[in-house]
Amino acid sequence: MWALQFTCIKLVEDQVGPLFTVFGPMALATLFLIPFVRAEKERPLPPEPGEHSNLVLYGLLIVFGVFPGQVLVTWGTRWTLASNGALITLTLPVCGAVMANFFLGERMTTVRCVSFLLAIAGVLMCSGQDIGGASFSRENLWGNLLIFSGVLGSAFYNTYGKKALKRHSPLRMLFYTYVGMTALMLPFVVAQEYDVVMRVPDFTTRTWIGLVLLTVFHNFLSMVLFLKALKVLDATQAILSAYLITAFGVPIAAIWLGERLSPVVIAGGVLVLGSTLVITVWEELRRKPVRA
């Protein structure tokens, strides 16, 4: 679902600016979450002694997590090459592992180190053409820095967010962050892209398809599933799924654009998928005692 994001952005970019590309689907996803949150029976837990209040906790997740992870990446992509963005995004699991060790005290086991190496090798096999077309010159410096700042924000949200999952369900955590993010972005959208809001009735079918896919899959369903996984897995394990974006993104682009997949790319995707299974399924099975 995350791999659909890049194709969807291409669908809407002719009529929608970078701010509204983030704001519109997120605002709609927030509305979709309301009936699910109200129907939940799981009751929130209060903060433990010495921990941040809910207001401070979600403020940190929004300002240092969701905002840079969404907005800065979108801006940065417009100022640099797409191949640069793809390569910089590959640092997300590594940044997440470092933050998980710092914020949550998670350890990098031998199995996790091997899985990271396998995943990186597979992603490089999938991204051979992108690496060849990357350019880290001064002209692209600011765009690259914005994307990397966004990657750090996503890593922060995916790791520090486990503190929120101790108090709230994945649906409630997502709803609170989206409400805060929508309120934070509203004045920016009105000031910078008010003309886009006025042109909503003129959106083409292509633009609406992109916005609907971004709303339902990227901002709603994929995040709910990821946060549910994050609630039961270590952050280091869950965040490795970011490598699958490239593994699935390449086949999606091949189907959408009619490109051909080389055997090397297919092998790279299999390697990434295998490494993800090792660090999630196999490691979890090793933890649990064998029962008759």
Image (spheres, rainbow, N blue to C red):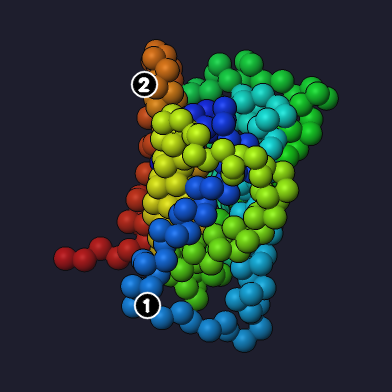
- For mark 2, what is the residue? 255
> Is disc 1 placed on a helix, strand or loop?
loop
- Residue 88 locus on image (x, y percent): 64, 34
- For mark 1, what is the residue? 42
* Residue 172: assigned label: none
Q: Which amino acid, by three-letter code, is at mark 2?
A: Ile
- Residue 209 locus on image (x, y percent): 41, 35
Q: Is residue 203 left or right of residue 83?
A: left
Please indicate, yes or no, whether residue 151 appears anywhere in the rendered image: no
What residue lies at 57% left-to-right and 27% top-to-bottom?
Answer: 14
Please indicate, yes or no, whether residue 191 appears anywhere in the rendered image: yes
Circle nearer the N terminus (2, 1): 1
Whether the residues at callouts 2 and 1 have beta carbons within 8 Å, the answer is no
- Residue 66 locus on image (x, y percent): 61, 54
Q: Which amino acid, by three-letter code, is at mark 1?
A: Glu
**Which residue, as the protein is rendered here, is positioned at the far bottom?**
49
246 and 107: which is toward the camera: 246
* Residue 178: quarter of image: bottom right
* Residue 47: quarter of image: bottom right
- Residue 220 locus on image (x, y percent): 43, 52
CA gap, disc 2 and disc 1: 41 Å
Q: Say few, some or many: other residues with alpha carbon within 10 Å of mark 1 (under 14 / 14 to 19 / 20 or more).
A: few
**Which residue, as the protein is rendered here, is positioned at the far left?**
292
200 and 135: which is toward the camera: 200
What residue lies at 30% left-to-right and 65% top-to-bottom?
Answer: 289
Q: Quadrant of the N terminus?
A: top left
Q: Is residue 68 left or right of residue 223?
A: right
> Is disc 2 placed on a helix, strand or loop?
helix
What residue lies at 66% left-to-right and 44% top-to-bottom?
Answer: 194
What residue lies at 64% left-to-right and 75% top-to-bottom?
Answer: 55
197 and 211: which is toward the camera: 197
